[in-house]
Amino acid sequence: MKMKPEQLRLIRRQLSTLCERSPFYRTKFAGLDLDAVRSEEDFRRLPFTQKEDLREAYPLGLAAVPESEIVRIHSSSGTTGTPVIIPYTRQDVTDWAEMFKRCYETAEITAEDRIHVTPGYGLWTAGIGFQTGAELLGAMVIPMGPGNTDKQLQMMMDLRSTVLCATSSYALLLAEEIARRKIREKICLKKGVIGSERWGEKMRRRIADELGVELYDIYGLTEIYGPGIGMSCKYACGMHMWDDYFYYEIVHPQTGEPLPEGEIGELVITTLRKEGAPLIRYRTHDLTREVPGDCPCGLPYPRIDIILGRTDDMVKIKGVNIFPGQIDELLRDVEDVSSEYQVMLDHLNGRDIMTLFFETGLSAKADRRRVEKAVQVRCKEKLGVTVTPMAVAIGELPRSEKKSTRIFDNRY
Ligand code: ZN
């Protein structure tokens, strides 16, 4: 994204005192002349900030304000080693709520809505972000958190929730449960705000159809406030990014070099206003691309595509880089194939084997062989790789309330 003059001004303001305020950046940028950063090109020469760097700052090494100004901390999931702790000032909390309110407004959600929040509450940023933004908007929040499907559906019916906030896998689980229990007429949902993970077009269509709602994508990550820093509008052509609060770049995941507009790469974010823990050129590991041109909705904020995958999910098989978004994309066009799939990678007799499990509504053996063949042809065309296709019945692949892993690499 082309750096705007206002963004450059905020970045220079940030850099002018950053090393005084932040012990983390004092070490990281030691020996660099930050006053010499006067243009986008200069800025792009600064080193990236990586998640591993943030881990080393555990617990409060990222703080760039005196402790008395920190009003809250959040933490990104510590499933792989030391967690990352992000401190927030009062202004950070306010800014995040403002951005989140803007997300709801972008989806034309109003104070009349009843917002059913299923993402979790606690150390991580999800639930509370959805809640504070909705309260600022003036809507009624139903702070469910995840799990307990019976209670979710009961509250959804009794309180007449109009907006569902969920991960895509949890929204799908609820949609399937509503269909199974035949309670669709008692559900008043109109909109779904779906966050935090990559999801395919088929899954989207199934959730939208079964719940009878319009779906919106919300973007964010704990290190940069949390969810709510970008949102799709009713035209569903990418997510608008609130570039008055941060500057983003899309770079080549391996080389870190900037990519031409429209090419898929890794999203890198710099905060412009964050006080508690400002971040410079933070690598999100999310794969996306810039959406060129203006949006028909008229919002002045630039757009990125919905998240197409994670650089960490990218696997190399037979010399080809593959990420889950590509598999979603190619399965979308094959008739009789549902949205759920799983990839198993194995190494047998000196060769890599890629097995692609997918769900289909077809049960006759001959029909399944036919659709397997179609999937195989499609993979060869799109990925350049020969896969072993395995059709299974709808519901046979695992559903989860958490981010679902779809590629399993058993080769090493
Ligand atoms: Zn728009």
Image (spheres, grey):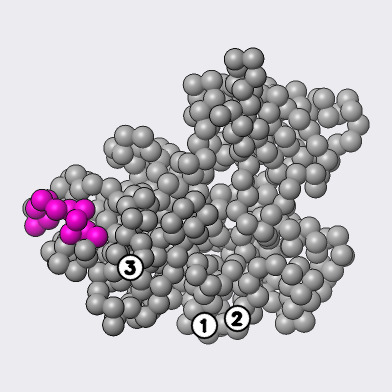
Nearest to viewer (mark 1 / mark 3): 3
For mark 1, does the 10 Å Cα neighbourhood hold few (<14), some (14 to 19), or many (20 or more) residues? Answer: some
Disc 1 secondary structure class: helix
Look at the image and give the residue range highlighted in magenta: 24-35
For the residues bearing labels 2 and 3, Cβ distance under 8 angstroms: no
- The residue type indicated by label 3 comes to Leu
Q: Which residue is mark 3?
A: 60
Whether label 2 lies within 8 Å of ligand 1 gets the answer: no
Residue pushed farthest top? 349
For the residues bearing labels 1 and 2, Cβ distance under 8 angstroms: yes
Q: Indicate left or right for 37 with 119 as reference.
A: left
Q: What is the quadrant of residue 121 in the picture? A: bottom right
Whether label 3 lies within 8 Å of ligand 1 gets the answer: no
Q: Earlier in the sequence, mark 2 or mark 3?
A: 3
Q: What is the quadrant of residue 369 in the picture? A: top right
Q: Position of residue 109 (x, y in %)?
A: 56, 74
Whether label 1 lies within 8 Å of ligand 1 gets the answer: no
Q: Which residue is mark 2?
A: 141
Q: Position of residue 397 (x, y in %)?
A: 75, 44
Disc 2 secondary structure class: strand
